[in-house]
Image (cartoon, rainbow, N blue to C red):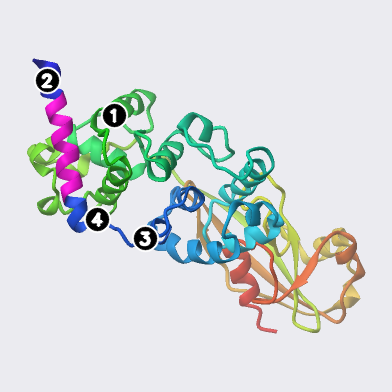
Amino acid sequence: MAEAYHSQAHVGFAARLLAWWDEHGRKDLPWQHPRTPYRVWVSEIMLQQTQVTTVIPYFRRFMTRFPDVHSLAGSDLDEVLHYWSGLGYYARARNLHRAALLVADELGGVLPETPNALQELPGVGRSTAAAIAAQAYGIRAPILDGNVKRVLARQHRLPGPVSSSKTQKELWRLAERHTPRDRVADYTQAIMDLGATICRRARPQCSLCPVRGSCQALATRDVERFPERAGGRNRRLERRRYFVLVEPAGRCLVERRPELGIWGGLWSPPEREANETLESFLAVAGIHRDLVDEVHAGAPFRHGFSHFDLAVEPVYVRLKAVPTAAHERGGRWIRPGEHALGLSAVAAKLIEANAW
């Protein structure tokens, strides 16, 4: 009897959700037309920790330049990062490029179909693999992104922070239970849409929710308590000084960042410790002090990451000539809109603020 009840409950949940999506769901997203495996894959990587409205313009530009896996695999990483600039979490772009090389060279340009095979690709985890398999190939595979976690945690009034292994295990069990066998691609989009547009983190629109009748958190009037959060941590503050060197023609010097760490592999004006002096920087960089024409401090600002804030202290240095040492050490001279390098949001802001 209990099994029959659970079966009816999950069919009811999926049926109500699909009926709502048929009328209110998002059906005009660019990766849905056409909904090819390649386009679904790229969109799912972009959508990791990023909202749909932010992703759409990046996705369209990316598809124009890299319309298929072979064009992506045949491009330099710098160009891929350039088209990703501003979208954040740049490891996603590096992994996407690595995976494209693997698919093009070893899989004949065909993206794998099963979730297990998709998880073998760099940057593709369990939920992303399931979302690709469901939407690109119609394979039944439960997903568990942030939106789905929120919907399920509220539906079942699930205690415990979603970051805990115990809660994660229960969420996967519930995701499996609710995923229907038919219309898997539509259901996958529907439950993500519900979390993004109705069952929002703040100010959820419960009166519009198609599954409000079975929502245990709504029944107890504590929807916003779920999903429960782990204990807060104090955000740390890191300070860095950026030396923005500007040569007579107005171009700024950038250098490639290390592959590991924030903005790995991107280009940026030289970043140093907050106590680095101009004289020390010039000496290490091999730039003679006589080449400096003028120096001024830019307005400091902060840039937020998920777990810390970066305090940026710009130092603008106008030079009388281009120093040869910069070329010898792999630096490049660029100006906004006239390069094809990947820049972090902070780097782009620093260069665009160049008053010279």
Region in magenta: 7-19
Query: How packed is label 3: few (under 14 Cα within 10 Å), some, or many (20 or more)?
Result: few
> Height in image: 323 above or below 76?
below
In-image side of 113 versus 186 (left or right): right
Callout 1 amino acid = Gly
Distance from the alpha carbon under mark 4 to that under mark 2: 29 Å
Foreground of the two, 281 or 185: 185
Residue where numbered disc 2 is placed: 4
For marks 2 and 1, give the one nearer the viewer: 2
Residue 272: tell me if it is visible.
no
Q: Give the secondary structure at mark 3.
A: loop
Residue where numbered disc 4 is placed: 25
Distance from the alpha carbon under mark 4 to that under mark 1: 30 Å
Circle nearer the N terminus (4, 2): 2
Callout 2 amino acid = Ala
Q: Give the secondary structure at mark 1.
A: loop
The image position of residue 184, as x and y in percent, is 30, 40
Foreground of the two, 302 or 120: 120
Residue where numbered disc 3 is placed: 29
Distance from the alpha carbon under mark 2 to that under mark 1: 28 Å
